[in-house]
Image (cartoon, rainbow, N blue to C red):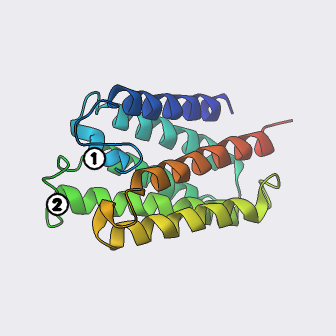
Amino acid sequence: MKLVYAGVAASVTALLLLDLLNLDHPVLDPVAHMASYFVHARAGWLLTIFAVACAAAALALVPHLRRRVALGVFAAGLLVAGFVPTQPYGQWDDQSLATVVHGIAGWAAFVAIPVAAWRSRRDVPAWPGLAAAVLAVLLAAGTVEMMGDGPDHLGHVAGLVERLLLAAELTWLLLAARAVRPA
């Protein structure tokens, strides 16, 4: 389970560093803009570190859970989204291959983790249905945000919603690691 803890710690560190290093960005704001928009900002490579570390944490749990597929989809979606960057903010092209691949992979990861939480509720009794409910609500809010008028639809909160979703996902990974650790 050390890999789970290390992956979560590296994920949190990478995302926090990315946000802190870009606090003075003239356009991007972590509350208003999703992390993907920061890929072309200062230290944008931290997004790839985040994706790899988070995917590694998820994959380290796979052998310990009976219901593994959703967690595998989560990890795969993170890896694809982490290695297929989007266009710079303001140059977003909904028709570009990178945007489509990144968007589908990211969305698959975000959908898969509440499914993994729900399906693994017997393996992870510390946070049974609550994890899935919290993640599903955040996913729904993020979907409404992005399907409206893009990142500016609900009063500039897409980044906050995404980061809350990521925090809930990382918390679930930690709780799952604690629940399934070998005796």
- The vertical placement of 152 against 13, above or below, is below
The quarter of the picture where residue 58 lies is top right
- The vertical placement of 73 against 20, above or below, is below
Q: Give the structural element (helix, strand or loop) at label 1.
A: helix
Q: Quadrant of the C terminus?
A: top right
In the foreground, 23 or 108: 23
Please state which amino acid type lies under the numbered disc 1. Tyr
Q: For marks 1 and 2, give the one nearer the viewer.
A: 1
Tell me whether circle 1 and circle 2 mark residues in contact (CB < 8 Å): no
In the orientation shown, which residue stands out farthest toward the front?
155
Please state which amino acid type lies under the numbered disc 2. Leu
Point 14% across, 67% down: residue: 95
Tell me how far mark 1 sits from mark 2, CA to CA. Answer: 16 Å
Which one is earlier in the sequence, the residue at label 1 or at label 2?
1
Residue 48 seen anywhere in this rendered image of the structure:
yes
Point 48% across, 35% down: residue: 53
In the orientation shown, which residue stands out farthest toward the right?
183
Give left or right: position of 90 versus 147.
left
Residue 121 seen anywhere in this rendered image of the structure:
no
Residue named by callout 1: 37
Pointer 2: residues within 10 angstroms few (<14), some, or many (20+)?
few
In the foreground, 13 or 97: 13
Q: Quadrant of the N terminus?
A: top right
Give left or right: position of 59 versus 83.
right
On residue 97, which mark appears? 2
